[in-house]
Protein backbone atom coordinates (compact mmCIF):
# COMPACT_ATOMS: atom_id res chain seq x y z
CA UNK A 1 0.00 0.00 0.00
CA UNK A 2 1.34 3.42 -0.93
CA UNK A 3 0.69 6.57 1.00
CA UNK A 4 1.58 10.18 0.35
CA UNK A 5 1.34 11.84 3.77
CA UNK A 6 1.31 10.89 7.42
CA UNK A 7 -1.49 12.57 9.35
CA UNK A 8 -0.94 13.13 13.06
CA UNK A 9 -3.75 12.45 15.52
CA UNK A 10 -4.05 12.19 19.29
CA UNK A 11 -6.12 10.02 21.58
CA UNK A 12 -6.31 10.51 25.37
CA UNK A 13 -7.59 8.10 28.03
CA UNK A 14 -8.39 9.39 31.52
CA UNK A 15 -8.16 7.15 34.58
CA UNK A 16 -9.83 7.91 37.90
CA UNK A 17 -10.95 5.80 40.85
CA UNK A 18 -10.17 2.47 39.06
CA UNK A 19 -12.18 3.56 36.05
CA UNK A 20 -11.35 4.60 32.50
CA UNK A 21 -13.23 7.34 30.64
CA UNK A 22 -14.24 6.52 27.08
CA UNK A 23 -16.40 8.53 24.71
CA UNK A 24 -19.12 7.24 22.41
CA UNK A 25 -18.45 8.96 19.09
CA UNK A 26 -21.63 10.66 17.87
CA UNK A 27 -20.36 11.88 14.49
CA UNK A 28 -17.49 11.73 11.97
CA UNK A 29 -14.59 9.32 11.81
CA UNK A 30 -15.22 6.24 14.01
CA UNK A 31 -18.91 7.07 14.53
CA UNK A 32 -20.77 4.73 16.97
CA UNK A 33 -17.51 3.43 18.43
CA UNK A 34 -16.11 4.05 21.92
CA UNK A 35 -12.69 5.67 22.00
CA UNK A 36 -10.41 7.99 23.93
CA UNK A 37 -10.73 11.74 23.25
CA UNK A 38 -8.66 13.22 20.48
CA UNK A 39 -8.31 14.50 16.96
CA UNK A 40 -5.99 16.07 14.45
CA UNK A 41 -2.76 17.82 15.46
CA UNK A 42 -2.89 21.32 13.94
CA UNK A 43 0.25 22.69 12.23
CA UNK A 44 1.09 25.24 14.96
CA UNK A 45 0.81 22.90 17.95
CA UNK A 46 2.67 19.96 19.43
CA UNK A 47 0.97 16.60 19.76
CA UNK A 48 0.69 17.10 23.56
CA UNK A 49 -0.94 20.52 23.08
CA UNK A 50 -3.38 19.00 20.60
CA UNK A 51 -4.19 16.15 23.00
CA UNK A 52 -4.97 18.62 25.84
CA UNK A 53 -7.06 20.84 23.54
CA UNK A 54 -9.08 17.95 22.14
CA UNK A 55 -9.71 16.51 25.63
CA UNK A 56 -11.10 19.86 26.75
CA UNK A 57 -13.16 20.35 23.56
CA UNK A 58 -14.63 16.86 23.59
CA UNK A 59 -15.06 16.11 27.32
CA UNK A 60 -14.70 19.51 29.05
CA UNK A 61 -11.80 18.47 31.31
CA UNK A 62 -8.03 18.90 31.79
CA UNK A 63 -5.62 16.18 32.90
CA UNK A 64 -1.82 15.79 33.27
CA UNK A 65 -1.33 13.76 30.08
CA UNK A 66 1.60 11.38 29.64
CA UNK A 67 2.56 9.85 26.30
CA UNK A 68 2.17 6.08 26.46
CA UNK A 69 1.93 4.77 22.91
CA UNK A 70 2.04 5.25 19.16
CA UNK A 71 -0.27 3.64 16.63
CA UNK A 72 0.44 3.71 12.93
CA UNK A 73 -2.07 2.54 10.40
CA UNK A 74 -2.80 2.38 6.71
CA UNK A 75 -6.13 1.92 5.02
CA UNK A 76 -7.10 0.70 1.56
CA UNK A 77 -8.27 3.56 -0.63
CA UNK A 78 -6.92 6.16 1.80
CA UNK A 79 -4.01 8.21 0.52
CA UNK A 80 -2.81 9.16 4.01
CA UNK A 81 -1.20 7.06 6.68
CA UNK A 82 -2.21 7.79 10.29
CA UNK A 83 0.05 8.24 13.28
CA UNK A 84 -1.88 8.42 16.55
CA UNK A 85 -0.15 9.49 19.75
CA UNK A 86 -1.84 7.83 22.70
CA UNK A 87 -1.88 9.66 26.05
CA UNK A 88 -2.86 8.57 29.52
CA UNK A 89 -4.04 10.92 32.26
CA UNK A 90 -4.37 10.04 35.97
CA UNK A 91 -7.17 12.17 37.42
CA UNK A 92 -8.71 15.29 35.94
CA UNK A 93 -9.88 18.83 36.63
CA UNK A 94 -13.29 20.17 35.75
CA UNK A 95 -16.58 18.44 35.07
CA UNK A 96 -16.98 15.74 32.43
CA UNK A 97 -19.55 16.92 29.89
CA UNK A 98 -21.25 15.44 26.85
CA UNK A 99 -20.44 17.33 23.65
CA UNK A 100 -21.77 17.30 20.07
CA UNK A 101 -19.04 14.81 19.22
CA UNK A 102 -18.70 12.52 22.24
CA UNK A 103 -20.86 11.01 24.99
CA UNK A 104 -18.40 10.23 27.83
CA UNK A 105 -18.85 7.21 30.06
CA UNK A 106 -16.78 5.59 32.84
CA UNK A 107 -15.87 1.89 32.60
CA UNK A 108 -14.28 -0.46 35.10
CA UNK A 109 -10.55 -1.13 34.71
CA UNK A 110 -10.88 -4.41 36.68
CA UNK A 111 -9.55 -7.33 34.65
CA UNK A 112 -11.13 -9.84 37.03
CA UNK A 113 -14.30 -11.31 35.44
CA UNK A 114 -15.95 -11.60 38.86
CA UNK A 115 -15.13 -8.12 40.01
CA UNK A 116 -17.88 -6.52 42.09
CA UNK A 117 -17.09 -3.14 40.53
CA UNK A 118 -20.38 -1.40 39.77
CA UNK A 119 -19.01 0.38 36.68
CA UNK A 120 -19.79 -1.36 33.36
CA UNK A 121 -17.07 -3.40 31.64
CA UNK A 122 -15.13 -1.93 28.70
CA UNK A 123 -17.28 -2.51 25.57
CA UNK A 124 -14.62 -4.40 23.61
CA UNK A 125 -17.06 -5.15 20.78
CA UNK A 126 -17.68 -1.43 20.21
CA UNK A 127 -14.05 -0.29 19.80
CA UNK A 128 -11.94 -0.01 16.67
CA UNK A 129 -11.27 -3.66 15.74
CA UNK A 130 -7.57 -3.53 16.65
CA UNK A 131 -7.95 -1.68 19.96
CA UNK A 132 -8.57 -4.81 22.12
CA UNK A 133 -4.99 -5.88 21.29
CA UNK A 134 -3.37 -2.86 22.93
CA UNK A 135 -5.89 -1.91 25.66
CA UNK A 136 -4.20 -4.36 28.11
CA UNK A 137 -0.97 -2.35 27.66
CA UNK A 138 -2.80 0.95 28.18
CA UNK A 139 -4.56 -0.44 31.27
CA UNK A 140 -1.33 -1.76 32.79
CA UNK A 141 0.49 1.53 32.05
CA UNK A 142 3.03 -0.15 29.73
CA UNK A 143 4.52 1.87 26.87
CA UNK A 144 3.62 0.43 23.47
CA UNK A 145 3.56 0.96 19.73
CA UNK A 146 1.79 -0.82 16.94
CA UNK A 147 0.79 -0.95 13.36
CA UNK A 148 -2.34 -2.09 11.54
CA UNK A 149 -3.26 -2.34 7.87
CA UNK A 150 -6.97 -2.03 7.10
CA UNK A 151 -8.55 -3.50 3.97
CA UNK A 152 -12.05 -3.16 2.55
CA UNK A 153 -13.91 -6.39 3.28
CA UNK A 154 -16.35 -6.59 0.39
CA UNK A 155 -18.62 -9.12 2.13
CA UNK A 156 -18.97 -7.07 5.31
CA UNK A 157 -18.83 -3.79 3.39
CA UNK A 158 -16.41 -2.18 5.84
CA UNK A 159 -12.72 -1.66 6.51
CA UNK A 160 -11.22 -4.44 8.61
CA UNK A 161 -7.64 -5.02 9.81
CA UNK A 162 -5.75 -7.60 7.75
CA UNK A 163 -2.30 -7.35 9.41
CA UNK A 164 -1.30 -5.92 12.77
CA UNK A 165 1.12 -6.09 15.65
CA UNK A 166 1.35 -4.34 19.01
CA UNK A 167 3.98 -4.48 21.70
P1 LIG B 1 -11.57 13.29 14.73
O1 LIG B 1 -12.12 12.88 13.41
O2 LIG B 1 -12.53 13.04 15.86
O3 LIG B 1 -10.33 12.32 15.04
N1 LIG B 1 -8.62 6.99 15.60
C1 LIG B 1 -8.43 5.81 16.21
N2 LIG B 1 -8.48 5.53 17.49
C2 LIG B 1 -8.26 4.25 17.84
N3 LIG B 1 -8.33 3.96 19.14
N4 LIG B 1 -7.97 3.26 16.98
C3 LIG B 1 -7.91 3.52 15.68
O4 LIG B 1 -7.58 2.45 14.93
C4 LIG B 1 -8.16 4.84 15.22
N5 LIG B 1 -8.20 5.48 14.04
C5 LIG B 1 -8.48 6.78 14.29
C6 LIG B 1 -7.88 9.30 16.25
C7 LIG B 1 -10.41 10.92 14.89
C8 LIG B 1 -10.09 10.23 16.18
O5 LIG B 1 -10.12 8.82 15.91
C9 LIG B 1 -8.91 8.24 16.36
C10 LIG B 1 -8.67 10.52 16.70
O6 LIG B 1 -8.71 10.57 18.12
C11 LIG B 1 -7.71 2.33 13.63
O7 LIG B 1 -11.00 14.66 14.75
Image (tube, grey):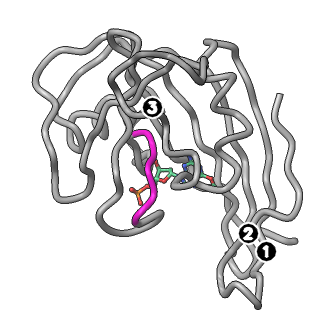
Label 3: element kind? loop
* 110 to 25, vertically: above or below: above
Of labels 2 and 1, earlier in sequence is 1
Residue at 68% of width from left, 74% of height from top? 159
Of labels 1 and 3, earlier in sequence is 3
153 left or right, relative to 31: right
Q: Are marks 2 and 1 in contact (CB under 8 Å)?
A: yes
The local crowd at label 2, few if under 14, some if 14 to 19, many if 20 or more residues have their Cα within 10 Å, is some
Query: Which quadrant of the view contains residue 68?
Result: top right
Q: CA distance from mark 3 to mark 2?
A: 30 Å
Query: Which quadrant of the view contains residue 128?
Result: bottom right
Q: Which residues are magenta?
A: 32-36
Q: Are marks 1 and 3 in contact (CB under 8 Å)?
A: no
Q: CA distance from mark 2 to mark 1?
A: 5 Å
Q: Report if the beta carbon of the residue with label 3 is closer than 8 angstroms to ligand 1.
A: no
* Mark sitting on residue 46: 3
The local crowd at label 3, few if under 14, some if 14 to 19, many if 20 or more residues have their Cα within 10 Å, is few
Quickly name the residue at label 1. 151
- Residue 118: percent from the left, percent from the top? 33, 22
Quickly name the residue at label 2. 160
Amino acid sequence: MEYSKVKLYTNAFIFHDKKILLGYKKRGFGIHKYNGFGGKVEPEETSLEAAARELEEEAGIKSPLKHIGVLFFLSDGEENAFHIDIYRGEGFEGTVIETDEMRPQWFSTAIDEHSSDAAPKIPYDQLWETDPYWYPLLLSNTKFRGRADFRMDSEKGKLLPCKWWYG
